[in-house]
Amino acid sequence: MKINLLFVFILLFAFSNAKSQSVAELYANRNYEELVKFADKTERLNAQDLYSVGYAFFQLENDLKAIEMYDKAIAKGLDTDHIYLYKGLALRYNMQYKEAIKTFKIAIKKYPEGQKNFTELANCFYLQDQYDSALFYFYQARNLDYALGDPYLKIPNIFHIQKDFDKALEEYKLSASLIIKSDPVYVELLKLIGQLEFTSTKNYGNAVKAYSEMLSFAPKRYDLYSKLIKACYANKEYAKGDSVFDILKGKHEEGKLSKNMMDQKGLIVDEFLMNKQKVSVEKFYKEASEVLDMTFRFYLLNKKGTKIIRSVHTEKAVGDGHFICEYKKRKHTNYGGWKDDNINYTDYKEAVVAILEGKKQAKQ
């Protein structure tokens, strides 16, 4: 009985203590649910407390109530750029773009050195696809002292959206040179530099450099490893590509990849065009140690790149060696192969391309 009474007393004390906490304490503890309960006692609150209650509503995604609290804080004398920045954000999330723009401009007037003030104003235009105005303010933001990664990414992103790939690549590289490398956006910039070097300039060596640096900063982003592997294969750095593949293979065996990656039997390691049609090459994680085991599978896509129209693979032979084979309407076709297990990928690729083009069979 004494234990039960003690437990009730502890609960009542805890409840009473939570109720007696100040707005500042609740704000410091991010107790937003309790903070918003002060909304009906605003006449007793000072300007900073009103801001804190408004911020709690903002975090709970009640933007209209947040705006109301921010306005009351301003009316009671809170006049820093910070209050206008967060009021502008609440207005923008509520899609009141014109009012948000006016409010962000007040924040800029209060503190013109604030990178975030310019960035969030630029985002008002970015979200409405008004890219010229967005760029005007993003450029001003990027020229200020670092506060967040958004302007460094959004400037080249706009040119990327507009398919001005040369300008986008130039701006990605400039942003990468300006941003602090601890910001996660830096990894994203390197990824996009690698992407454009791979797809637009076809400078596979530069793609390898960008992706290699990307993974040096994000070694556990296993979902990005395929980008480096494909760049290595495109640049004929097969040994390096395979060494990266082996890292993933090890993680797959240990069960340390994402569920999606664990469900896959292999990884796309190469992509190239054959007569203006894309060919993707999958390499399997499991070693081809038993008869019929595959090492590579080549997928020929239709001209739109939306559907696989042929699939040709390597197949472990009895004893040593591999064949190149294909299943067509459940019929197994053997195009011949090699009696040696140590065949270079380039030999497979050359033979498969010839088969897909209908020129010849593989070497015997």
Image (tube, helix red, strand yellow):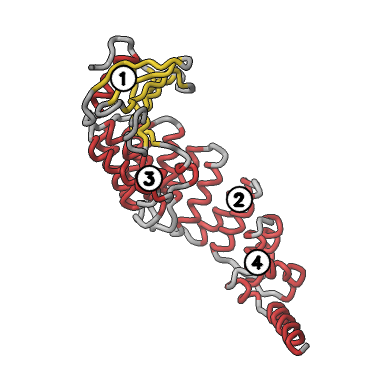
The part of the image, by quadrant, that contains residue 203 is: top left
Mark 3 — residue? 189
Q: Earlier in the sequence, mark 1 or mark 4?
A: 4
Image height of 79 relative to 124, above or below: below
- The image shows residue 217, relative to residue 172, as above or below, that is below
Mark 2 or mark 3, which is nearer to you? 3
> Label 4 belongs to which residue?
32
Seen at 70% across and 60% down, the residue is 68
**Mark toward the start of the polypeptide (4 vs 2):** 4
Q: Are marks 1 and 4 in contact (CB under 8 Å)?
A: no
Q: Residue at x 26, y 28 (%)?
A: 319
Judged from the image, the secondary structure of the residue bearing numbered disc 1 is: helix
Q: Does residue 172 appear left or right of residue 13 in this picture?
A: left
C-alpha span from label 1 to label 4: 62 Å
The residue to which callout 1 is attached is: 352
Res 264 visible: yes
Q: Residue 345 placed where, x, y %?
A: 26, 29
247 or 31, nearer to the observer: 247
Q: Residues within 10 Å of mark 2 (few under 14, many from 20)?
A: many
Q: Residue extending furthest front?
A: 319
Q: CA distance from mark 4 to mark 2?
A: 24 Å
**Which mark is first along the chain, 3 or 4?**
4
Q: CA distance from mark 1 to mark 2?
A: 58 Å
Q: Which residue is mark 2?
A: 100
Q: Residue at x 75, y 90 (%)?
A: 2
- The local crowd at label 3, few if under 14, some if 14 to 19, many if 20 or more residues have their Cα within 10 Å, is many
Asked if one can make out residue 303 in the rendered structure from this viewpoint, the answer is no
Element at label 2: helix
Tell which circle, 2 or 3, labels the residue nearer the N-terminal end.
2
